[in-house]
Image (cartoon, coloured by chain):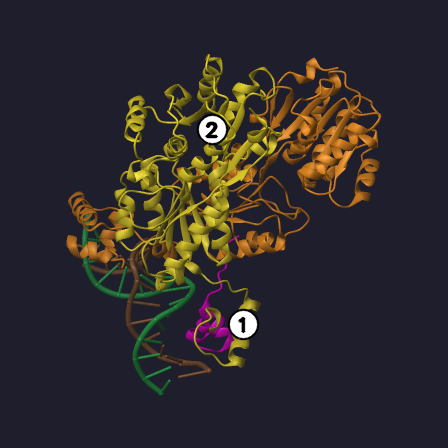
Chain colours: A orange, B yellow, C green, D brown
Amino acid sequence: MKARKVTIVEVAKGAGVSTATASRVLGKYGYVGKTTKERVLTVASKLGYQPNKIARGLITGRTRTIGVIAGDIASPFYAAVLRGISDVVEGHGLGLLITNSDERLDREVAATKLLRENQVDGLIVSPCDVADSPHLREAVKAGMPMALIDRKVRGLLVDTVAVENIQSSRDAVMRLLLAGHRRVGVIAELGPDETRLGDFLASTENQLPEDLALLSTSWQRLAGYLEAHHAFGLEIDPKLILAVAGHSATAAKNAALAAFNHTARPTALFCADGLMSVGAMAAISARGLEIPSDLSLLCFDDLDWMTFVGPGIDAIAQPRRRLGRAAARFLLARIGEAEGAPRDIRLAPRMIERGSLQSIR
Amino acid sequence: MKARKVTIVEVAKGAGVSTATASRVLGKYGYVGKTTKERVLTVASKLGYQPNKIARGLITGRTRTIGVIAGDIASPFYAAVLRGISDVVEGHGLGLLITNSDERLDREVAATKLLRENQVDGLIVSPCDVADSPHLREAVKAGMPMALIDRKVRGLLVDTVAVENIQSSRDAVMRLLLAGHRRVGVIAELGPDETRLGDFLASTENQLPEDLALLSTSWQRLAGYLEAHHAFGLEIDPKLILAVAGHSATAAKNAALAAFNHTARPTALFCADGLMSVGAMAAISARGLEIPSDLSLLCFDDLDWMTFVGPGIDAIAQPRRRLGRAAARFLLARIGEAEGAPRDIRLAPRMIERGSLQSIR
DNA sequence: ATGAAAGCGCTAACAT
DNA sequence: ATGTTAGCGCTTTCAT
């Protein structure tokens, strides 16, 4: 069972033309006579000719393939982003070469290498190191078109598409405050470094630092939380900031449980991402499925789990597919020789109101 | 900002050796002197040489890339399967070219064409048409190694990895029956053809048809439901078979609501897939979040939503990553020249017991 | 509008 | 162990 490949040469021979002419027809270049064209096409389809994009790529220098470095394609977030990318890229007839970094720099470096060796025409990266990424910088310097998703990298001037985290968190927490809540807890993954939170709170007491765009998602959302309180002229109670060390629902659950047992428990809880939301829910449903009527829940939902839970929780859904589509479109524009300054787009999440904000307290 | 490409020729020139020797070093072939090797390597890294896999692929005829045709990479099922594939494939240093079919034949055909033109070394397909797929047959005939995921195609003799639907459904429903339930409802997406269900029930009254492996997932799970009842010598009550016409949670919800309002309502509900499970839960939580204590719920969970719901529901989780890994391993084995009859593997799902079966009724 | 020929970057035969 | 040469399948000058 060996593959019998039909080449352009054979088609040309069959049609009695030169390989150049056959190539012109099959590759849609230049001028060809109408009859010749038909003859070549007939022979090609009769022989079952299928172009070899590898060979084409070798000479044109373009593979019509886009490389993607995602964190984990199994996560709902990246899966949806990927789908957005895929829709645009497939729509243009290009292929998609996909890798996972698992948010590890070494894997991202390896993926970059693999994709570059495969001569992809462009790269869409969800970078795991926000501070510095020599391998990405190097790729860009070598002329690789690139678009960043979800995060920026310091000093890497390429198109970036991210979620408008700060403003949307601010707006969301504002609603809670407007609804009358005065003890709004926030539960967020704020890294293993325990001193950083104190520093951050101190540094944001009067004004927010300027490089907020470089913060990771959770910190940005915390910043929104702080901004909302500042706007209301409210003091920040550090006890209400439930800093979870790891990215784990269980850890979030424990943090939430501790807060619920506290004497001055929050009347509302703002969950800064999907896993934190799950943890909070797990804490609530530890004794059943019911949400206490004296607790308002506002969750960032990047896990799609809100769909499955009944009313009583307000959610903020990330524009994930749109994120992917925007990044892909930016990249394709670059590949199409578009010039200009790098764009830096922030897409606004969508509020899903289920009425809990108004009804409670 | 133009890409300055470093070729093997330049490296060879720099190291003062022939291109063949440089290639032998850089491509890890044949014998080379130790000093020469070092010299070439030094020059290569100094010049920043990066192999061009396109050129390599043209001559070797292998691209070290696997093509995947998934239904929808944004769905939790495919996302997880894909991750399984990705883990194995990346582990071997190969790339992954990914497409979506959206379960549409025309898109699957187009994807097959795209991937073949890209000269992928193998194809992993989740076929959308179980009856016949000339394009896949053609690809196999042309020598394309292939592995099928989740579904078989009639007459396509290639490695197949699927979920053991019939047996696991049978076992699951058996548990309900053993727990004393006598009115077990099943909610499943059974297509728009309403007469088919009657035919199916009639044909399975005495024995199951032999080509069960070719049935779609839902029908297989219904078959398991029937088998369990047969094993118990129980009559099938058609009223308990909630056939949902489309793949929609809302439709499932309506079917479940209708069943709950029925005078002889089921005491247990077997949900044949994730969306049906969501529909059932939505029906239940229409008036709140609580699961009635006189209803046992047993759900196929391919949406991961069970994670978020508290106790009270038993679930059957599909081995999705394992599915992907197995398919990828099979395919890589074929590519590595492995011969032999096509394997046809059924992976068993995992029961997640939450105690509802024993405690109820 | 068509053909002849060169060559993309690499590897595989065949020499030496 | 290393060099020479041919050529993978295609596109692209440069002729005609």
Q: Is residue B317 left or right of residue A286?
A: left
Q: Secondary structure at mark 1?
A: helix
- Within 10 Å of disc 2 (Cα), the crowding (few <14, some 14-19, many 20+) is many
Q: In the rendered view, would you say A239 is above or below B36? A: above
Q: Residue at x 33, y 24 (%)?
A: B192
Chain ID, mark 2:
B
Q: Secondary structure at mark 2?
A: strand
Chain ID, mark 1:
B
B16 inside magenta stretch: yes
The image shows residue A1 at horizontal and vertical percentages of 26, 58
A328 inside magenta stretch: no
* Viewer-proximal residue among B266 and A193: B266
Residue annotated with mark 2: B271
Q: Amino acid at mark 1?
A: Leu
Residue B295 tag number: none
Residue annotated with mark 1: B41
The reply to whether callout 2 and callout 1 are in contact (CB within 8 Å) is no
Q: Quadrant of residue B121?
A: bottom left
* Range of magenta residues: B1-24
Q: Quadrant of residue B230?
A: top left
